[in-house]
Image (spheres, rainbow, N blue to C red):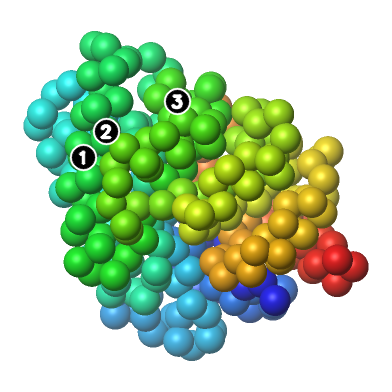
Amino acid sequence: MFRYSVTQWIFGDETLEESLKRLKKYGYDGVELAGEPDSINLEITKKLLQEYNMKCSSICGIFNPERDLSSSNEKIRNNAVQYVKKSIDLAKSLGASTLIVVPTCVGKVSPETDLEEEWNNAVSSVKEAGIYAKENGITIAIEALNRYETYLVSNLTLALRFVEEVDVESVKMMADLFHMSLEERDMKDALIKIKPYLAHVHIADNTREAAGLGQTDFKPILSFLKNIKYSGYITMEFLPAVSNPYIASKLHGESNIFDEFTKQSIHHMKEIVKNL
């Protein structure tokens, strides 16, 4: 019914081939790759995806301070837009349908200038990138982060308003269950509100560990996705306990923990789906 993938950069400095072997072993359908167009070897990546019969489900944009779509600095803002366009090209080259975009850099918890100004900057930046995405058949999925990682779009209500202001057909939304566990009073009600725009889903428990290790009840969410015939990927994004998620991409992790969490996540999802 559902297609499952994992965000590969959460495995730290592990090679893509090591990750794909693990995903294949546990029955995943795809992998979400980090949006680093200048460091991905397309030829090798395509070869590995084919070898392990794995799809590139999506590209996860990496939004550091030099890629801030809301910045009051025009040079930074333009650089961010060009980065998104290059990530769209990467998605297209790898057959991914979706690029995840955060309207400001991760970890920016207050505006440099004025909230309204930076909101408008982000809307304008994403509109430009969204038009390019539409021309290339790629969907941009706006991600709302929790209040401890962003000040701008921190819940699905704000994300909905943002997408409606951008008003470009290719710009939609994603739901991240970890962020939602912090920011939404009722996760299913929040999903109902964004239903027309829902393009992608990230899964982690409220502890940001593998699904089933914390307190989140995933059954109502999966039931909702089944009822609306959701056709995107269910993408696992469990992380170590770090303040900035991007730190995870530089860590050298233990493969047995990766195995445990990768297996736990998909088994927990499939067990729930089996009983829906």
* Foreground tag (3 vs 1): 1
Q: In the rendered structure, which amino acid carries the disc numbered 3?
A: Thr
The answer to whether marks 2 and 1 mark residues whose Cβ atoms lie closer than 8 Å is: yes
Number of marks: 3
Rendered-image quadrant of the N terminus? bottom right
The answer to whether marks 3 and 1 mark residues whose Cβ atoms lie closer than 8 Å is: no
Please state which of residues 52 and 212 is positioned toward the viewer in this rendering.
212
Q: Position of residue 97 (x, y in %)?
A: 40, 69
Q: Position of residue 253 (x, y in %)?
A: 61, 49
Check the image and report above or below for 160 versus 42. above
Q: Secondary structure at mark 2?
A: helix
How many C-alpha atoms fall within 10 Å of the one at disc 2: few (<14), some, or many (≥20)? many
**Alpha carbon of mark 2 to alpha carbon of mark 1: how far?**
5 Å
Q: In the rendered structure, which amino acid carries the disc numbered 2?
A: Ala
User: Which residue has dot 2 on it?
Assistant: 122
The residue shown at (82%, 45%) is: 217
Q: In the rendered structure, which amino acid carries the disc numbered 1?
A: Ser
* Foreground tag (3 vs 2): 2
How many C-alpha atoms fall within 10 Å of the one at disc 3: few (<14), some, or many (≥20)? many
Q: Position of residue 89 (x, y in %)?
A: 23, 65
The residue shown at (28%, 18%) is: 116
Q: Secondary structure at mark 1?
A: helix
How many C-alpha atoms fall within 10 Å of the one at disc 1: few (<14), some, or many (≥20)? many
Residue 259 seen by the camera: no
Which residue in the rendered view is the most extreme toward the top? 113
User: Which residue has dot 3 on it?
Assistant: 150
User: Which residue has dot 1 on it?
Assistant: 125
Which residue in the rendered view is the most extreme toward the right? 275
